[in-house]
Image (cartoon, coloured by chain):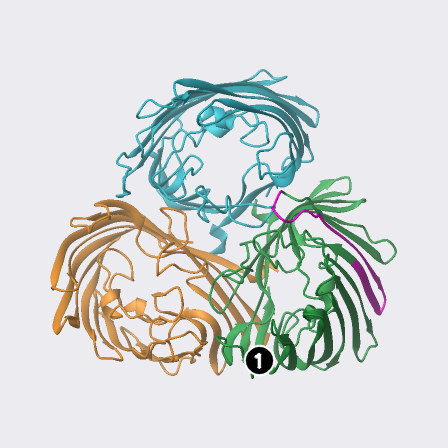
Chain colours: A green, B orange, C cyan
Amino acid sequence: AQSAVNITGLLDIGVKYNGNPSAGTPTYAVARGNNNRITFSGAEDLGGGLTATFGLQHRFEPDTGTLENPSGGTSRPFWQGESRVGLRGGFGWIRMGRGLTAVQDPNGAYDVYGVATVASLQGVLTAGFNSDPAQSNGAGGGRVNNGIFYQSPDLGGTVLRASFSPTEGVAGYKHRHTGLSAEYKAGALNAMAGWEKNSAGNSLVEIAGKYDFGRAIAFLGFSHQDTIDSARDRTGVAFGARIPVGKLVIKAGYGRLKTKDFVGSQSATDTVLGTGVDYLLSKRTYLYADVARLKTAEGSTALTYRQATVADLGIALTF
Amino acid sequence: AQSAVNITGLLDIGVKYNGNPSAGTPTYAVARGNNNRITFSGAEDLGGGLTATFGLQHRFEPDTGTLENPSGGTSRPFWQGESRVGLRGGFGWIRMGRGLTAVQDPNGAYDVYGVATVASLQGVLTAGFNSDPAQSNGAGGGRVNNGIFYQSPDLGGTVLRASFSPTEGVAGYKHRHTGLSAEYKAGALNAMAGWEKNSAGNSLVEIAGKYDFGRAIAFLGFSHQDTIDSARDRTGVAFGARIPVGKLVIKAGYGRLKTKDFVGSQSATDTVLGTGVDYLLSKRTYLYADVARLKTAEGSTALTYRQATVADLGIALTF
Amino acid sequence: AQSAVNITGLLDIGVKYNGNPSAGTPTYAVARGNNNRITFSGAEDLGGGLTATFGLQHRFEPDTGTLENPSGGTSRPFWQGESRVGLRGGFGWIRMGRGLTAVQDPNGAYDVYGVATVASLQGVLTAGFNSDPAQSNGAGGGRVNNGIFYQSPDLGGTVLRASFSPTEGVAGYKHRHTGLSAEYKAGALNAMAGWEKNSAGNSLVEIAGKYDFGRAIAFLGFSHQDTIDSARDRTGVAFGARIPVGKLVIKAGYGRLKTKDFVGSQSATDTVLGTGVDYLLSKRTYLYADVARLKTAEGSTALTYRQATVADLGIALTF
């Protein structure tokens, strides 16, 4: 009964500024920073080293009370974050359902901004890769439907992950998602490398690491997206640092993402240059402020760039 | 983790009778009285007098299992009731997200029926005012999206509230929501006054009070809605009493709402005259029965009135 | 407050195989077996033998994170499983809201597969009966909206149930749902009989029983669906057994469902022949594997049969 379910969550909301908004988007908005979520999870000890597990993560927009991305081609299912049942033992952890792929599961820890704030480099690290274009909730944020997920036990500091999703007869998507990654943690060093292929046949390679020098944590990451028709292949590089100073954490980062044949045979390069500061109110709650300069390619017949200064000021808490 | 989240709720369902239903609506229906809800909330003591807070309130229809108002122009988001994150301290309480405006937050306590039952006078007290017509979930029940909310500490019996919502570029809605209210509580007397303007530029003034004479609580309230084009301005007055008799609470009330230029230059006056009784099964649960006579203006080319006797019989509980 | 709410649930996901899928459906899929759910429920002791109760059951698809049956004519409301408020006392239990009918509430216990797995005989036992076609979420899985439900106290081993739902003016559905059932439990014998009529005027009779011989539990059930225009009347019979062997439970069953006038005046008979095994990991968690041979009538102008071997392999847990 109730003893078996844990309810946890993350809330993050603030004011966002965009100095050069596209048509129909505002200069100032109240909006989420990170993805707001409530998670229902549990684990049952089955004896003999076996554990049954489940995790259900709802996502929502705190500024409007709707599901995450409530409309359009990237609208999310209610349990967007995760809906998985699993079995854990000496062999590792096998789960089935919807969840982050082998590559996209660990990689959030390698964005200097933790996949939040206007300065986030996650888009560079994942090359904007869509793990499951066959599902109707298109760009599912690195997740696959109908997935089978494996995570190895800790093998002397290394954890291996694999994800697989059968095609389920969606017209036009004949490839099966397959993902593999390895993550290594030893003292001050964390590093990961992974590869995945999505239902359209496109693939992503990501290599990332971070090192804790004590006074600062340095981040570095590479991504390459290889499309099945070689058009719009993308290559990204991101680096940054987190510097704790008392109750403050100073953050800074830079990323660039090159897209091949963006317009005709012309390549384009998006960049993100940002900095910010977190003020820790407790272990679970902090205020944040960030500013970034974004350069984003636009145009279908002629390549142009939209340059914008963006900023945010908000509060994030976990429970 | 789980220690930090409280799950509370309100359920209210019964049988409703309408003696003169409009076309396509039934004479008898199983339906909610009050708005059914589940709330996930929490507070974290940050030390130094500071508290981080969150509140997420889901609303639903208990007779059909759907979200509140599941279809049409007033369909609700999943977290219709509230989705707010806040910081509370000696300065008061600042919250961001979706929630009741400064006027509509306290005013439910000034309806003799507590914004429930077929005899509710809440429509008169708020003059049917839509706090955020720019949002797609139109008549959001006194709530604004993208809101910033302030509530003062208790200033010698008075609490001040303010709400603000930036425009976020929705075509046709160029006004920013702004709301202000003051509520005063001293012994037997409770009173409030407030003003707000919505995203269409229309404004609402509400003044209401109640006094506990011991044998009865008397209620009185006024509202005035001022539309930006002066058409369909609305003025309401409501009064009533709650009389506790052992485990019973007898309720009675009257309200009238005058709408200017309802048809051409012709004004219309809706009235609600009702009475009811609650039977307290515990501090958290009661049975209720109510009957009311409604007179409601109709017609676009000629003014007519629909007169109907309505009644309900139901059960409400909180958890 | 929180002490009053219980959060429980059931998760069931696995790999399904269909050896002869219809167009657009896959041979292999990751999918739910049983209906995945989270339930929020509670009971308040009101004294004097009275208890107030509530139950809210959310249903979802664990493979995609969406609500149950997310699209098309059988899409489900968020609280698909149940949304009911009730009062329980010496007189029995009265509930209002959305929930299983008097017949469909107890009958899940009479399917040898517990209304789960590819070999389930529940479709035969309920003759594919739709308890509330008037509601937009069509085939609601044996549930009615706007229901009033009665369950008697235990009358010497017998429990009586009744369900009722007023028409609420949905065009074309002038009948009120009415359902009645009796269930008898005495030692090794469980049995039920029930009748219901839906909003279209069609009726269902179901008689089912099971007997625990110690080494095995035998199941037997009959159904008859009587349509208001006598077309497509359906008659079903199902039988099977569950045989516990240590941590294993072996399951086997057979069902046939005859549909009158399937094509013109030609009747059709669907059959299900299946077997499977559960491996109990704990009292709350098990692995399962099943295989069945399905023969299903198709065609609108000429009667044909689709024959398919189907199988599943999955994990189910409750919390």
Residue B87 sits inside the magenta stretch? no
Which structural element holds mark 1? strand
Residue A190 sits inside the magenta stretch? yes
Q: Residues within 10 Å of mark 1 (few under 14, many from 20)?
A: many
Name the image quarter holding residue A223: bottom right
Seen at 81% across and 44% down, the residue is: A91
> Residue lying farthest right?
A156
The chain to which mark 1 is attached is: A
Of C65 and A283, which appears nearest the observer? C65
Extent of the magenta region: A169-194
Q: Name the residue beneath numbered marker 1.
A: A313
* Residue type highlighted by circle 1: Leu
Seen at 47% across and 46% down, the residue is: C41
Does residue B304 appear left or right of residue C138 in this picture?
left
Does residue A318 appear left or right of residue C87 in this picture?
right
Does residue B11 appear left or right of residue A229 in this picture?
left
- Residue C4 location in percent, x, y? 47, 51
**Is B116 above or below relative to B188?**
above
Q: Magenta residues: mostly which secondary structure?
A: strand
- Is residue B262 visible from the viewing direction of this image? yes
**Is C1 above or below relative to C134?**
below
**Is B223 above or below relative to C214?**
below
- Residue C223 location in percent, x, y? 43, 21
- Is residue A112 visible from the viewing direction of this image? no
- Residue B96 location in percent, x, y? 49, 74
Seen at 62% across and 30% down, the residue is: C20
- Residue B62 location in percent, x, y? 38, 48
Name the image quarter holding residue A1: top right
**Is B176 above or below relative to A10?**
below
